[in-house]
Image: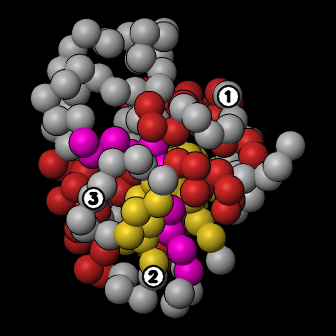
């Protein structure tokens, strides 16, 4: 099975998320513009907003407490414990960890919209300069948090195939260009 973990980096801009033919789990505000199968939000603002507005399962820590180790799922107006122990700090790696816990040997985990190559530059975010992410002239967040957590996930789940979708190389896992991803996983409309 194919799973696509969708971040909000600008590298996903050429891809219409609604055309992706796979199980899609998106981060934070993606639901405002695209349909996904599941959402993940670790930030209190997004978690609370999604809880009120979206009609898809949401993975989060209900109380946004760094000491709360287990994830919960919000769907149908209620929070329930889930079986995957929380290991991550950010939405992208938390979504990865959750899906990897559910995936079967040989399944593909595509990482789309995670722009690891922008250290030291300004914010590289698909929603920058909008009401939800206004800080376009500020430095980008430290990518090492995501990278370190991603490396741990790759080690924990060697039975899965991780593919980073981006037009820049990365030596930690397989890579696929944006065009190759479109050809393989997007519908031809």
Of discs 3 and 2, which sits in the foreground? 3
**Region rendered in magenta:** 107-117
Q: Nearer the viewer, residue 31 or 189?
A: 189
Location of mark 2 (residue): 160
Where's residue 160, x and y in %?
Answer: 45, 82
Q: Residue at x 25, y 67 (%)?
A: 172
Location of mark 3 (residue): 170
Mark 1, residues whose alpha carbon is within 10 Å: few (<14), some, or many (≥20)?
A: few
Q: Can residue 154 be seen in the rendering of this structure?
A: yes
Q: What scheme was used to colour the molecule?
A: secondary structure
Q: Can residue 54 be seen in the rendering of this structure?
A: no
Residue 3 higher or lower than 8, as above or below = below
Secondary element under disc 1, as helix, strand or loop, is: loop
Location of mark 1 (residue): 33
Q: Earlier in the sequence, mark 1 or mark 3?
A: 1
Q: Residue at x 32, y 12 (%)?
A: 136
The reply to whether callout 1 and callout 3 are in contact (CB within 8 Å) is no
Q: Quadrant of residue 120?
A: top left
Question: What is the spatial separation of the Cα atoms under label 2 and label 1, in whole angstroms?
Answer: 29 Å
Where's residue 31, x and y in %?
Answer: 64, 35
Where's residue 135, x and y in %?
Answer: 31, 12
Secondary element under disc 2, as helix, strand or loop, is: loop
Q: Earlier in the sequence, mark 2 or mark 1?
A: 1
Does residue 109 show up magenta in the picture? yes
Secondary element under disc 3, as helix, strand or loop, is: loop
């Amino acid at each position: 099975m194919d799973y696509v973990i969708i971040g909000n980096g600008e590298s996903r801009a050429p891809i219409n998320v609604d055309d992706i033919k796979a199980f899609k789990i998106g981060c934070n505000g993606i639901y405002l513009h695209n349909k996904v199968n599941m959402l993940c939000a670790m930030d209190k603002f997004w978690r609370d907003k999604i809880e009120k507005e979206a009609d898809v399962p949401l993975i989060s820590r209900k109380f946004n407490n760094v000491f709360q180790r287990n994830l919960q799922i919000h769907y149908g107006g209620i929070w329930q414990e889930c079986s995957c122990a929380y290991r991550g700090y950010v939405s992208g790696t938390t979504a990865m960890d959750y899906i990897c816990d559910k995936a079967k040997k040989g399944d593909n985990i595509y990482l789309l919209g995670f722009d690891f190559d922008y250290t030291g530059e300004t914010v590289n975010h698909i929603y920058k300069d909008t009401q939800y992410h206004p800080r376009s002239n500020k430095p980008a967040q430290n990518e090492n948090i995501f990278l370190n957590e991603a490396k741990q996930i790759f080690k924990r789940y060697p039975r899965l195939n991780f593919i980073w979708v981006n037009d820049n190389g990365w030596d930690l896992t397989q890579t696929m260009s944006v065009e190759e991803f479109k050809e393989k996983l997007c519908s031809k409309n």
